[in-house]
């Protein structure tokens, strides 16, 4: 039987949208590429993060806030259905600062954004001593932190597993090793794979991460995305030493400390480098000196998927109505919005969120 939706790309973005569509009773087939693909969903930092998002575009801050607010319910539903907890913890997160100047400059920007959001931006500034009460292992070089109460983190690999299990349980089809090479529109969309097979569907979603750089223009999108490398480290499992996550380090649900991530413009190169990893380690030890004694067990590099302004892209193709580009820089944070709210936009219901600022019109 033909699908209502063919979703190209089975990372966290494609699977979150697939899950939301299946929950509405739609038929969904997900086509995911081969093992040589870049897969941000398997290499990220796991933050469900609001602070610092949308400094120049409050709608992005709101979209992230609405997703963060929907996350607990989304995670409960996934866990109830699959038995897999996804490690969600939402008790706030820190932006740590090593100088008063940088702390003050960031607070000034947050105040501007807070005003543009009508006051809905719950954060507080903690000086060193107040922070130390919350985080006894914080080092003397940290002058203070911004504690944003809408922030949190989850386990991205457990999220992927829960999503793929539940997509299948709900009747969705996930086809692995299906590299899509082209899409034609006749009465239906014909999604053509490198192995010669074809899937037909009423609508199609391009959520192929960096794969959209090549496929996007074939479907009538600009898809002006680029890779940005992030290197990451993880330590052995440790007793509880970090209570809340920050952009520098977080203690994952299994006990290890994840340290990250670099921001490097190196094209399609996801290797780790000695300067990258030692820079991360030095910053983490400056924040939490106890980490100087931790054993590192793993490091990796992964590629972010970035638009020119860092905002998501949600666009229906002008050349192929019924084809949508869905891509973003923060697919873990936005997983709940993609599952809960994006289906209304895709189906054009009265409850569709206003996503106009995220269209490709901003790149013309
Ligand atoms: C180091 C790092 C840290 C990050 N930290 C965070 C964080 O803390 N919080 C957060 O919210 N986000 C974070 N992110 C971003 C987040 O990981 C991504 O936004 C998210 O994983 C993107 O998911 P995706 O499904 O769009 O892409 P991907 O995970 O890259 O998946 C794309 C999928 O498409 C498939 N594909 C590609 N081309 C084709 C094709 N032609 N045919 C079929 N399939 C195809 C691939 O096989 C792949 O499985 C981080 C990213 C990195 C790299």
Image (cartoon, helix red, strand yellow):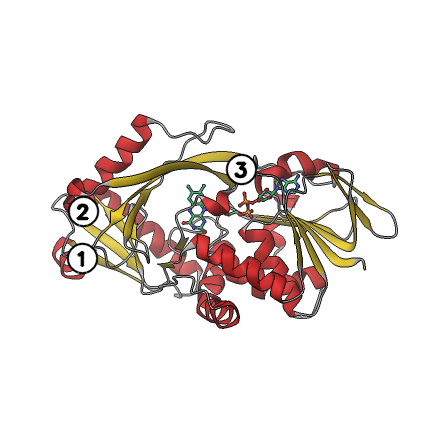
Q: Which residue corresponds to the image point at 47% horizontal and 67% vertical from the top-left?
A: 75
Q: Which residue corresponds to the image point at 50% horizontal and 51% vertical from the top-left?
A: 331
Looking at the image, which is closer to me, 70 or 125? Answer: 70
| Residue occupied by mark 2 | 288
Q: Which residue corresponds to the image point at 51% horizontal and 71% vertical from the top-left?
A: 77
| Residue occupied by mark 1 | 135
- Residue 219, located in which quarter of the rendered image? top right
- The image position of residue 264, as x and y in percent, is 41, 31
Q: Are marks 1 and 2 in contact (CB under 8 Å)?
A: yes
Looking at the image, which is closer to me, 349 or 211? Answer: 211
| Residue occupied by mark 3 | 38
- Looking at marks 3 and 2 on the same chain, the residue that comes earlier in the sequence is marked by 3
Helix, strand or loop under label 3:
loop
Helix, strand or loop under label 1:
loop
Q: Which image quadrant: the N terminus? A: bottom right
- Residue 98, located in which quarter of the rendered image? top left
Residue 93, compared with residue 143, is above or below; it is below
Q: Which image quadrant: the C terminus? A: top right
Q: Is residue 349 visible?
A: yes
- Looking at marks 1 and 3 on the same chain, the residue that comes earlier in the sequence is marked by 3
- Looking at marks 1 and 2 on the same chain, the residue that comes earlier in the sequence is marked by 1
Q: Quick one: label 2, few (<14), some, or many (20+) residues within 10 Å?
A: many
Q: Is residue 202 left or right of residue 292?
A: right
- The image position of residue 307, as x and y in percent, is 54, 40
Q: CA distance from mark 1 to mark 3?
A: 35 Å
């Amino acid at each position: 039987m033909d699908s209502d939706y063919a979703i190209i790309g089975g990372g966290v973005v494609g699977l979150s949208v697939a899950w939301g569509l299946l929950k509405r009773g739609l038929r969904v087939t997900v086509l995911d590429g081969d093992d040589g693909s870049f897969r941000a969903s398997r290499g990220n930092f796991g933050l469900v993060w609001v602070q610092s998002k949308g400094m120049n575009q409050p709608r992005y801050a709101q979209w992230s806030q609405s997703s963060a607010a929907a996350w607990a319910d989304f995670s409960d539903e996934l866990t109830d259905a699959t038995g897999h907890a996804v490690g969600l913890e939402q008790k706030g997160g820190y932006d740590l600062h090593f100088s008063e100047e940088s702390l003050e400059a960031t607070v000034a920007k947050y105040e501007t954004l807070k005003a543009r959001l009508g006051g809905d931006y719950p954060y507080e500034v903690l000086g060193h001593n107040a922070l130390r009460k919350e985080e006894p292992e914080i080092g003397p070089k940290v002058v203070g932190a911004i504690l944003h109460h809408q922030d949190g983190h989850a386990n991205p690999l457990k999220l992927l597993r829960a999503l793929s299990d539940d997509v299948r349980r709900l009747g969705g089809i996930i086809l692995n090793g299906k590299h899509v090479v082209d899409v034609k529109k006749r009465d239906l969309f014909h999604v053509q794979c490198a192995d010669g097979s074809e899937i037909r569907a009423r609508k199609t979603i391009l959520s192929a991460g960096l794969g959209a750089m090549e496929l996007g223009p074939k479907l009538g999108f600009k898809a002006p995305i680029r890779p940005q490398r992030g290197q990451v480290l993880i330590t052995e499992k440790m007793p509880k030493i970090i209570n809340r996550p920050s952009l520098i380090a977080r203690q994952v649900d299994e006990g290890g400390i994840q340290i990250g991530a670099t921001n490097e413009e190196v094209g399609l190169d996801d290797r780790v480098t000695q300067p990258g990893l030692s820079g991360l380690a030095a910053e983490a030890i400056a924040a939490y000196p106890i980490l100087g004694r931790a054993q590192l067990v793993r490091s990796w590099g992964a590629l972010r998927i970035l638009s020119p302004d860092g905002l998501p892209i949600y666009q229906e193709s002008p050349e192929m109505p019924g084809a949508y580009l869905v891509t973003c820089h923060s697919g873990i944070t936005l997983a709940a919005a993609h599952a809960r709210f994006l289906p209304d936009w895709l189906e054009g219901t009265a409850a569709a969120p206003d996503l106009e600022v995220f269209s490709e019109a901003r790149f013309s």
